[in-house]
């Protein structure tokens, strides 16, 4: 049996996909979000008592730490913790040590993609940690991802994910501002997006967010709040290596503005609306 802790938008999509092929027991702090699964645990401690492989899909490193402090009280010897959370680059190293000291293997496994790729098994997955543990969980990861990158070095997967999400945020800002500019200049939105698709704007980001831009339906696949957290982690990574990142800082402040306007729980593509209104 596989364990799953954390059923946010993407966490639930991944857990549902695994449950189609494997027996799974789930836990979420808000029990309502676990409805629909056959096996629902009363606590994270129950999950680790019944599963040798436990996935985490949580909001941030603070949430991971809170769950870790609970499950570390259990006997974790021989267990494998697969953490799909996008973590802080320093705290993830602490998690490696915490679980190692408890006799468990910890794999940081942040994913690239959102709800729809998760449902379809089309994520890109970055993994750092013990190679033997990685080989054991690989069949589960292959159910979730189309491309999996393994790195032995702890922390590397997390750094790569943070840098990727900086690019994700920057692309979305560029696309949103370009569409807003075109509309202001009298160009019809669908026509403009078609040109961008066949020109410099052609990207995975535009393909994924095209319908949201056209319909202005910003129901959440990946929230403003989550992206801003990742942009902040990326900015702190840059500071730690004394590397100026001018664009990251600007993109982070734009999403902070979205946060201040009360749209933090909407999909991050809502930045287009904010840019259009400026």
Image (cartoon, rainbow, N blue to C red):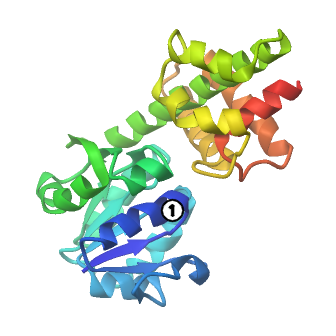
Q: In terms of image quadrants, where is residue 13? A: bottom left
How many marks do you count on the picture?
A: 1
Is label 1 in a helix, a strand or a loop? loop
- Residue at 14%, 51% (x, y): give it: 131
Quarter of the image that includes the N terminus: bottom left
- Residue at 49%, 57% (x, y): give it: 10
Residue 72 percent across, percent down from the top left: 38, 77
Q: In terms of image quadrants, where is residue 46? A: bottom left
Residue 189 percent across, percent down from the top left: 72, 22
**Rendered position, 126 above or below 165:** below
Q: Answer left or right for 29 relative to 216.
A: left
Seen from the viewer's position, the closer of residues 237 and 176 is 176
**Rendered position, 238 above or below 228:** above
Quarter of the image that includes the C terminus: top right
Does residue 123 appear in this view? yes
Does residue 244 appear in this view? no
Q: Residues within 10 Å of mark 1 (few under 14, many from 20)?
A: many
Residue at which label 1 appears: 58
Q: Answer left or right for 257 relative to 94.
A: right
Seen from the viewer's position, the closer of residues 117 and 174 is 117
- Residue at 62%, 45% (x, y): give it: 229
- Residue at 68%, 31% (x, y): give it: 252
Residue 215 percent across, percent down from the top left: 71, 39
Seen from the viewer's position, the closer of residues 217 and 173 is 217
Residue 36 percent across, percent down from the top left: 48, 81
């Amino acid at each position: 049996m596989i364990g799953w802790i954390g059923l946010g938008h993407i966490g639930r999509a991944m857990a549902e996909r695994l449950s189609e092929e494997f027996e799974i027991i789930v836990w979420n702090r808000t029990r309502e979000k676990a409805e629909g699964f056959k096996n629902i645990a009363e606590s994270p401690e129950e999950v680790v008592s019944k599963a040798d492989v436990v996935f985490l899909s949580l909001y941030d490193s603070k949430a991971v730490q809170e769950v870790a402090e609970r499950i570390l009280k259990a006997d974790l010897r021989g267990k494998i913790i697969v953490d799909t959370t996008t973590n802080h680059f320093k705290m993830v190293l602490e998690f490696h040590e915490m679980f190692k000291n408890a006799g468990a293997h910890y794999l940081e496994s942040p994913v690239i993609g959102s709800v729809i790729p998760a449902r379809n098994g089309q994520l890109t997955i970055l993994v750092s940690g013990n190679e033997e543990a990685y080989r054991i969980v690989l069949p589960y990861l292959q159910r979730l991802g189309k491309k999996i990158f393994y790195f032995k070095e702890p922390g590397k997967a997390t750094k790569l994910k943070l840098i990727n999400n900086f690019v994700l945020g920057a692309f979305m800002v560029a696309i949103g501002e370009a569409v807003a500019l075109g509309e202001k200049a009298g160009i019809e939105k669908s026509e403009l997006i078609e040109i961008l698709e066949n020109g410099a704007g052609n990207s995975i980001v535009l393909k994924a967010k095209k319908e949201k831009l056209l319909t202005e339906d910003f129901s959440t696949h990946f929230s403003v709040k989550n992206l801003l957290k990742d942009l902040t982690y990326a900015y702190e990574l840059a500071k730690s290596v004394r590397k100026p990142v001018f664009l990251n800082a600007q993109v982070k402040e734009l999403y902070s503005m979205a946060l201040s306007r009360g749209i933090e729980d909407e999909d991050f593509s809502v930045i287009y609306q904010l840019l259009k209104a400026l």
